[in-house]
Amino acid sequence: LYRLRIHELYDLRDWNGLLGYLKKLDKHGILNTQWKWQVGQAYILNGQSEEAVDYLFHLHSFYPDQPDIQSALLEALQKAGKKIEDFSWLSRPEVSPVDVLFLGKSIDFIRKSKKAIPIYFLYTAVTCEHKVLFDEFDLLQALKADDRFQVLNETPFFRYSKIAIAPKGYQNTA
């Protein structure tokens, strides 16, 4: 029943309500380990990055290898303007930069889809297995600078810009 309420608050984008509800569940011992990290995520969504770092640090000390806690902690650190090196990790996660290897994975994913795909979809697909400290916009900029990719229908709402593999002889003008 409580999971339904969590999803409802999330769908309503009621971050303050979500945070309050999750904290209440956590206080009463209702949240299991797999859900506790979401309190930290709710802090982030509510614009309280420092509080998220504090909460997630506490969780990290008990569950240092839990990937959801590590990912949320990385996001909280980034939103708080801190670097991965600024944190005393008990188990430091491996973080992938936007590099040649990562862009190669992007090419593979686009080839499998056989058509241009929105940047938000590509970002989600290639980052689901990797912890990253860059966002969709950073990925878009890296793709624009690489002649192997072509950006289609670029708009101010860059999340909906589509990425394709560039035809032979194509040169980016970015």
Image (cartoon, rainbow, N blue to C red):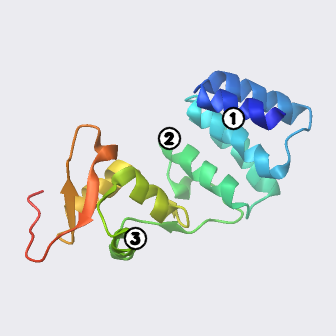
Do callouts 2 and 3 mark residues in contact (Cβ within 8 Å)?
no
Task: Check disc 1 and report its element: helix, strand or loop.
Answer: helix
For marks 3 and 1 on the same chain, the one whose residue lies earlier in the sequence: 1
Do callouts 3 and 1 mark residues in contact (Cβ within 8 Å)?
no
Task: Check disc 3 and report its element: helix, strand or loop.
Answer: helix
- The reply to whether residue 147 is in sight is yes
For the point 54% across and 58% down, which residue is it? 85
- Label 2 vs label 3, nearer the camera: 3
Other residues around mark 1 within 10 Å, as few (<14) / some (14–19) / many (≥20): few
Q: Quadrant of residue 42?
A: top right
- The residue tagged 1 is 7
- The residue tagged 2 is 79
Classify 88 as above or below 130: above
Report the amino acid beneath label 2. Lys
Q: Quadrant of residue 158?
A: top left
- Label 1 vs label 2, nearer the camera: 1
Q: Nearer the viewer, residue 163 or 15?
A: 163
Other residues around mark 2 within 10 Å, as few (<14) / some (14–19) / many (≥20): some
Q: Quadrant of residue 18?
A: top right
Classify 90 as above or below 57: below
- The residue tagged 3 is 109
In the image, is 146 to the left or to the right of 68?
left
- The reply to whether residue 133 is in sight is no
Could you say where residue 46 lies in the image, as x and y percent from the top left? Answer: 59, 28
Q: Nearer the viewer, residue 31 or 49?
A: 31
Q: Nearer the viewer, residue 134 or 160?
A: 160
Q: Nearer the viewer, residue 5 or 48?
A: 5
Report the amino acid beneath label 3. Phe
